[in-house]
Structures are given as structure tokens and as C-alpha cells.
Image: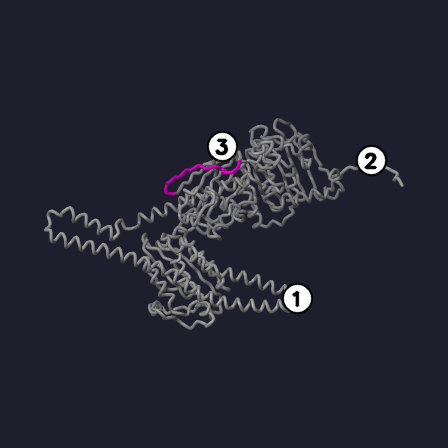
Amino acid sequence: MKNLVEKRGKLLFTVDSALLRELGERLVGKAHIALAELVKNSFDADATKCTITFRANEIEIVDDGHGMTLQEFERFWMRVGTTHKAGEVYSRTLRRPLTGSKGVGRLAVQFLANKVEIQSTAAGGNLSLNVKVDWNDAVHHEFITEASADFELTSSLSSYANDSPHGFRVILSGLRQDWDNQSLKGLAQEVWTLKAPFDGFAGKGNLDQSHNFNIEIESSEDTDLELSSFSQQASAAIEQWIAKIEGVIERGRKNNKQRVKITFQDGKVFEESFYVSENENCQIDSATWEIRIFNLSGHYGSKIKVGDARKYFSEFGGVHVYDGPFRLPYYGIEQDWLGIELDHSHRKVRSALLPSHFHVERALNDLPTQGRILGVVRINTGSEHQHASPRAIKSGDYLKIQVTRDRLQINKAYDQLKNAVRRSVDLYAVFSMRQRHENARRERPELSPVSQAVGLQGLLSEYKNEIPKRVYNEVSAAIETFTSSVEKEQVYSDSITSLLGPLATAGMSALALEHETSRQLSILERIAKNLSGSGIRAEESAKEIRKWILDFKSMRRVFEPLANQEDRETIKPLRAARVIDIVIDSLQHFMNSTTVTQDIPTNILLPAATFVEWQGIFQNVFTNALNAMLAVKQVRKIHVDAGYRGKNRAWVHISDSGSGVDLSDTETLFEPFRRKGDIPEQRRAMGLGGHGLGLTIVQMIAESRGCSVRFVEPAQGFNTTFEIEWRI
């Protein structure tokens, strides 16, 4: 039977007014991002100054930009999602690259406050526009098209930032968040970081158009944010760098090149060039970056304390990305977007991004951690869109921001930018390690005993004709015998020394593994028994298997250096902080409820030795500390710190809250098979002490590398402190 059409026509889409609030929540999300959107509008309006004032329940943003007429306000501000900026690459007067393109920035005010009042006077105009919007009222209408704003035009002209007769003012009231002094201060500090703290190479290009745009943050007397103090401390902290990495990509789509410049505090400068991408076309037109590296120890002078600098970098450090003059909020200390911390945790020593001829032994050991770097990466997504080819635009392979406006779209262009910046950080690590190797060579004695003997032989030859033949032959033979003996002794000494570290680690680890294997086999037997029974217990058994795998993997960390030829055989100075980090990580399986803290200056180097030797020393010392805390009921804690004595001595202290030692009788503890107290059989079976050889081995390795070891007066809050000291 044929259906009869009773009615035909078109249905129109409608948009619920609740979308205003939904978009504000989802596309803005955080208060400082919302404020950033308003500041960006000021920048796009060619303002030279934008002032943000915090009051008890009000925030005011005012600029000296070109302002808006009533027609412009109705066409652009009142239209959600307008994309007029996408077609306009530069601002109308100062030719700045426009920072907005999605047309949702004005929703930031809805996220921050329930009410907004706007004042605007257009440049060259003689009327002031006043607009009031009540967001609660707007979202109660059924459709967005029914929501409205009240306005009036007056001949009473307002004054804006810099006493300008034209500009834009936004007054937010009925704030949606509870803003106490502390939260307002935090918000103000986030806004303070909107602009990059330094420029580097960026000052030489057109990416930074912010030199004539200033953001000022003020507060009323009843909302004292101490912003001037924060600004001064931050400025002082970022000037204490020990190295600086600068990089630039110019006309990348044409030449596929990046330049890198590394500057050290002592004035040494290194410059290199690389291809942005070896295997494909460069998808980036321009980018610049500067990354500063800090040593957060010692004394910073009167302007800022080291502790304050650490706090600043722990909150605002890391490498940030700036689109035009403004920071994208996703990047920084909380995001390891360059993979630096990941490579630290995996103990990578060689860069995958640098050509092979740059390789230096253990170069990536000198990678700075997130907590002691501050970086600025500058791009301009508007300019990137303009320079992208039609094919790139169609595929999306150019630098662009996600709709959330907090990060870059992950694509080929993003990967190339990330690799270019990370390549420059790896290059810093290479040059830093090279300098350490050079310093180590300079600090060695100019002539070894063998070289001195050869020199003596040469001197003897010069006087051969003036010395009786019999005397000459006897002295010459004696020198040859001495030289041969020294050479053999050195070879023997090096071979014995190089074995001590592996033996110390292998002995302890083998016993631990034997115990752990027996324990894990028992677990497997129980799991097998469970699995052979009722199916109800299968999930429980599966959880046990997964836990077993994790435990066993944790145990294997103890053996990692023994399996690495470079760790076993390469003798060179190592960073104390890095070595101790790795040893602590390898012993996590045995730490239980022990808290380990450390305060080690990053520039302290251990005397030249293999990594396995130092691992053997620190593993034994930490093991002693863990055993000493077995019977302790209070908090179990270990603290490691290091420092200098005068100009030519350095030390490391390992302190614990264990049972303590008698300082008048500690010498006997270094004798073979001497130990303090009884260690439970279970701990001895795990290889965690109890054999009386640990401190003997520690002393043997340490002294062979020019170190002295001893127990010293405990640090405050601890019962035992073990010291390793050496001459620099």
C-alpha cells in the first residue's frame, strides 16, 4: 500500500541557551585560562597596556586598545563562534598576529562571573558604549537567540588604561568561584606568567610582538596579593642560570634547518645546526626557544633565597609553549612533553635525536630535570596557518591549537617542534658532559709514575756520555725494572678495584635473588593450587600473578648495572645526585615504609670510578641504614645530603633514624665479619646485611678511589650519619 505524504517542509536547528554555560565550562575550564582569553582580546585590539585589578568580589580588566563601536560589538562580541579573526591574520593598526580564531573567548567571562559590565569607546569615536549582561538570566531563556544584553550609548566619555580616551573595560561581579586571598594570589601569579619571562632568539624574529604590550596586575587594599614581591623574586630567580639553550627555526618549510646555541655561565659558547626532520618535509615555518638551566643549591645572594627559588621552579618551571605572546596552559612543570623525566627514569645515556658523531659517554646523565629548568618556546599558530600549503591545511599537518585552546594539536608539525626543542636540550647535555671529561683530565696528575720513569730514562740518556758506562747501565736497568713493576702493579690494582664494585653488588644481589626466588616460587605454587580449584578464585589468582610480576621486575633493578658493560668498565666522574637517585630506585623493593629525602647540589661530582663501584658503596650503606631501622617503631627515614668543605674537599652524608652507633667504637665496624646487633634471619636470607663484609667492601672501594669513610656526629633528627669525603 503506498504511503501518503501528509506534510513536507524544512526544520530549523535551534540552540539551547544552556550551551552558553556548557561552552564556558568545557572550552575555558580554569580561571587563569579565562582571564588569558580576555587579555588576548586586548592584545588583538592593539592595546599597549592591559590592567587586571582584583577586588573583594570583583575583577576588572581594562586596556587602551581601539575599542568597539555598537555595530562591532553586536556583530562580533554578541555572536558566539564568529570566526572573523581566522580570516584576519594581523591586527588593524600595529599588525600584530591575531591570537584568537574560534570566537568563543568571550565565554570566559561567563565562566568567571554571573554578571558582566562592559564599557567601550572606539578610537576616533565620540560615544561610550555601556553593556550589562546577566548570565543567569541569559541561560534561563529557551534559546540562545532569545538571550539578550542591555546597552546604552552615552556622550559621557570614559578613561581607560594609560588615561587613553579609547579602549575596553570588563567588570566581572558575582564571581562564580570562592576567592579568598590565597586563591586570588595564585590566580594572579598564573596571570603573571602569561607573558614569557625572557626572549632569547625570539627577540630577533617577528614571533614576539609583545614588546609594546604590558600586563599589569593590581589589587585593592582589602585584597593584598603581595604581587610585587612575587614578581621581584621570580625575576631574581630566573637570572641565576648556569647554562642557557637557545634555538631557532627560520623559514623551516624552505630550508628544513634549526640553529642551536649553548651558553655556559663561564662564558663558553657552542653553536650547531641540524635538519628539523631527516626523513620528511619540515611542517614548521618559524619557532624560537630559550631554556635556562639552574643549580638550585648554594647561595643566591640577597635578592632571593635558594629555598624560594626551588619553590618558584617547582610551581612555574619546566618548558612552556607560547602562541604569539601568550602561554598555552598545558605545558610546563606538570607535563613532561619533551620526555626528559621519562628518559631519566629509563636511565638513557645516548640521544636518539643527535647525529652519532656527537655521542659522548653517558651524555644524557647530564639532562636537567624538570624542576631546575625554565623554558620558553615561541610559535604563532596564526602565522603557521597562513604559511601552510593547501595540502598541509587539508591534512592538518601544521601547528594549530586544539579547540580546548590549552594545547597544540598532536600531528607531524607538533612532533617536529618537540624533537627540535628536545634535540637542543640533548646537545646541552653532550657539551656539559664533554666539559666534565675535559675538567677531569686537567685535574689528573700531569705525569703518571710510568711517565715520570720514562722521563727519567730520557734525562739519563742526555747525560750518557758524562756518566761511567757501568753506572749508566745499572741506573738504566733499575729504571726499566721500576717502570715494569709500576705498570704491572697498576694493571693489577685496576683489575682488583674494578672487581670490588661488582662483587659487592653481585654478592648482596645473589643472596637476595635466591631468597626472593624461593618466596616467589611458593607464591606460584599457591596460585597454581587456587587455579586448579574453583573458578571463583581465578580473578584473585590473576591479581596475585600480576603482583608477582611487578615484584620480580622490581628485584631485577638491582642487577641492571651489572648487565651494562659501560657501567662495569667505564671510569669517570659521576654526578652524586644522579648515582644516588638510581641506587634508591633500585632498592625500592626493600624500602617498605621508609621515607628517603635528599638535598644534593647538582654540581657535586664523585671521584672517577665505575658506576658499579659507586653502586656497591651506596647499596651497602643504604642496606645498613635499612637494617638499623628494623626494630625502630617511630618514623623510618633516611636523608642524603652533600656539600663542600672549603675549596678542595667534598662530602656526602647518609643519615638514618635507626638504632645508632657508638662513635667511640666505629673503627671496628669496618673490620671483616664484624657487625653491630643481630639481623633477623629473614633479612640475612634476603642478602640485606648480616654478613659483616659490607663496610669492609665500602672502605676498600672508597679508599681505592681516594675517599675516606667514617661515622660522624648524627644530623639533627637522626641517630646515625655515615660520611664519604674526598679531595676535589
Residues in magenta, as a range? 265-280
For discs 1 and 2, the disc positioned in front in the rendered view = 1
Mark 1, residue position: 535
Label 1 is placed on what type of residue? Answer: Gly
- Which residue is at the front of the view, 105 or 180? 105
- Residue 121: x percent and y percent? 63, 31
Say whether disc 1 or disc 2 marks the residue closer to the N-terminus. 2
User: Which residue position holds label 3?
Assistant: 255
Q: Horizontally, is 424 left or right of 173 in the view?
A: left
Separation of marks 1 and 2 at Cα, in angstroms: 61 Å
What is the secondary structure assignment of the residue under circle 1?
A: helix
Report crowding for label 1: few under 14, some 14 to 19, many 20 or more residues within 10 A (C-alpha). few
Residue 492 in the image: x percent, y percent? 30, 59
Which residue lies under the disc numbered 2? 9
State yes or no: residue 574 in magenta: no
Gap between marks 1 and 3 measured at Cα? 64 Å
Looking at the image, can residue 117 be seen?
Answer: yes
Residue 269 lies in the magenta stretch: yes
